[in-house]
């Protein structure tokens, strides 16, 4: 990709879905490299980071803004191995485990985002 450091840009090349990107922080998905940090910034603004892993354990509850998916209006909890594939938790200042329950689709980890090592 172009860095903005010079007028020369590398030739575009297709990477298959699942190919590691952003120094192994994400996986290519439909031409993008979604990572949780960028999703937190888009949702909450500058100065936000991804919450500690302990926050993601809330996704095992399947309630409030903590779940993996919704089926027929019911919030489905995440399996322990999938806790980082459900609701996205972000940290800003003293707020360690921020999640959005206003728009569930915006507050969820985006499709294609690396949410585990398997």
Image: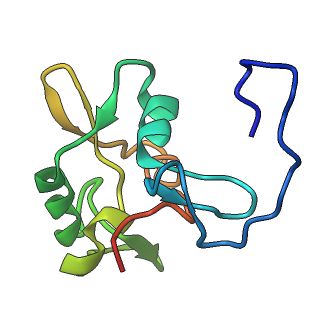
Rendered position, 42 above or below 67: above
Image position of 11 (left or right of 72): right
Depth check: 18 or 37 in front? 18
Q: Residue at x 60, y 69 (%)?
A: 19
Depth check: 86 or 69 in front? 86
Q: Residue at x 17, y 28 (%)?
A: 95
Image position of 77 (left or right of 44): left
Depth check: 57 or 53 in front? 53
Image quarter hosting the N terminus: top right
Q: Residue at x 24, y 69 (%)?
A: 62
Image quarter hosting the C terminus: bottom left
Quadrant housing residue 116: bottom left
Q: Is residue 100 visible?
A: yes
Rendered position, 92 above or below 22: above
Image position of 63 (left or right of 22): left
Quadrant housing residue 5: top right
- What x and y, as percent, mark residue 112? 56, 65
Rendered position, 62 above or below 41: below
Q: Residue at x 87, y 20 (%)?
A: 7
């Amino acid at each position: 990709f172009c860095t903005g450091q010079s007028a020369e840009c590398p030739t575009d090349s297709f990477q298959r879905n699942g190919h590691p990107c952003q120094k192994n922080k994400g996986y290519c998905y439909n031409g993008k490299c979604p990572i949780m940090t960028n999703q937190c910034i888009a949702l909450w603004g500058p100065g936000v980071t991804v919450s500690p892993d302990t926050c993601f354990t809330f996704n095992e509850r399947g309630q409030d803004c903590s779940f993996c998916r919704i089926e027929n209006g019911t919030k489905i909890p995440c399996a322990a191995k999938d806790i980082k594939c459900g609701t996205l938790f972000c940290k800003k200042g003293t707020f360690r485990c921020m999640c959005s329950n206003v728009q569930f689709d915006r507050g969820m980890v985006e499709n294609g985002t690396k949410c585990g090592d398997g």
